Image (spheres, rainbow, N blue to C red):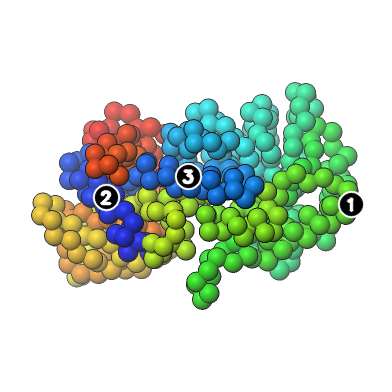
Amino acid sequence: MFVDALKKQNPQLIEAAITLWRQGAILPDTYVIDVDQVLENGSKLLKTANDYGIELYLMTKQIGRNPTLAQRLIELGYRGVVAVDFREAEVLSEHQVPLCHVGHLVQIPDALVEKMLRLHPQVITVFSLEKAQQISKVAQSIGVVQPVMIKMIAESDQLYPGQEAGFMLNDLDNIVQQIQMMPGIKLTGLTHFPCLLWDDKQQSTLPTPNLQTLLTAYNRLTDMGVGIQQLNAPSATSCSTLPLLAEYGITHTEPGHALTGTIPANHAGTEPERIAMVYITEVSHQFSGISYCFGGGYYRRGHASKGLVFSSSSSTVQTASILPLDDSSIDYHIPLEGHYPVGSGVVMCFRTQIFVTRSDVALVSGIQTGRPVLDGIYTSQGMLKQGAFYG
């Protein structure tokens, strides 16, 4: 999906990934992240958001919940991160990464509510009265008042499978009344997802019906006299979409793919954020005229279409088509159209969610100055790998 953009915006990253692979410093099925470029992208996002009066919460699931990279970005001026599920919240909090927003896509299990409250997140999203009541009860017991957001849904809204959740818009008055009666929590925000999406036909990132639902809920609460301090509209956040969000009065959003330049709008390499992440693997074998690479990092919504194939020793580079994978099967291997020598390196660049893969994550600094340094290798869940035989 992003190979052409990668060659245009960051050919140094390709060279660094291949060099590390040839040295045996990284294995196949590794995402290589250009730390310096991520920080540059993060700086651009932060400046644009500040210009438009929007606060950004860092999204780390796309980069494997990596606490080291999160901390580096926070040093730029970000307040903290959004943890989209409780596993991410655990990993990041164990590394003292400040949690700003928890509970959005996945609620906090009862057994973790007290732990999360003691970390003092800026806001917690709830989408059931039972969860709101549980947070209220625990908050009272430890003597805090926790700000919460509610996620509102209308019948016409777009929800991804596995993410069906939220209070119905037509029940807004009743929901708010009940939440306001719960001591220990304070309703301060509204959220939804996805609020913006890339449109292939229009070749543009456009508002979804979900954004209108969010704004409708906000207007109704304003009329009710409920002070909403945070209007959170995640999805497709980038330097190009922040001005649009500001026009709608959005106060907070959560960049993820923009940090690595892998937003759909950047498929031609024209966005301010530059590509900062590649996937490297290796040809394992051939079968029935097809070459198969080591898998583990395939993401079924990644739109991976082609890869760059490198000889293990020469400078020859070939472009290979990635054949479709059966989404019902495990990605043990990734098929390439054609015959490529066993042991050849393959660089791919596509939209991914590293936290759902089995891949390694290699953080590399110095790429942009021609002196790449392997800072560390992590699991897809953000844990530093210790005692690995290859580094």
SS at mark 1 in the image: loop
- Could you tell whether 103 is left or right of 357 in the image? right
Foreground disc of the pair 2, 1: 2
Location of residue 34 (image quadrant): top left
Q: Residue furthest bottom?
A: 201
Residue closest to the eye, 243 or 149? 243
- Look at the image and tell me in which quarter the N terminus lies: bottom left
Q: Residue at x 52, y 55 (%)?
A: 238
Q: Residue at x 59, y 66 (%)?
A: 206
Q: Does residue 144 lie above or below 247 as drawn?
A: above
Q: Please rate how many residues cluster around mark 1, counting C-alpha atoms within 10 Å: few if below 14, some from 14 to 19, many from 20.
A: few
Q: Residue furthest front?
A: 51
Disc 3 and disc 1 in contact, CB within 8 angstroms: no
Q: Earlier in the sequence, mark 2 or mark 1?
A: 2
The picture places residue 60, in percent across and down from the top left corner, at 50, 43
Residue 160 in sight from this viewpoint: no
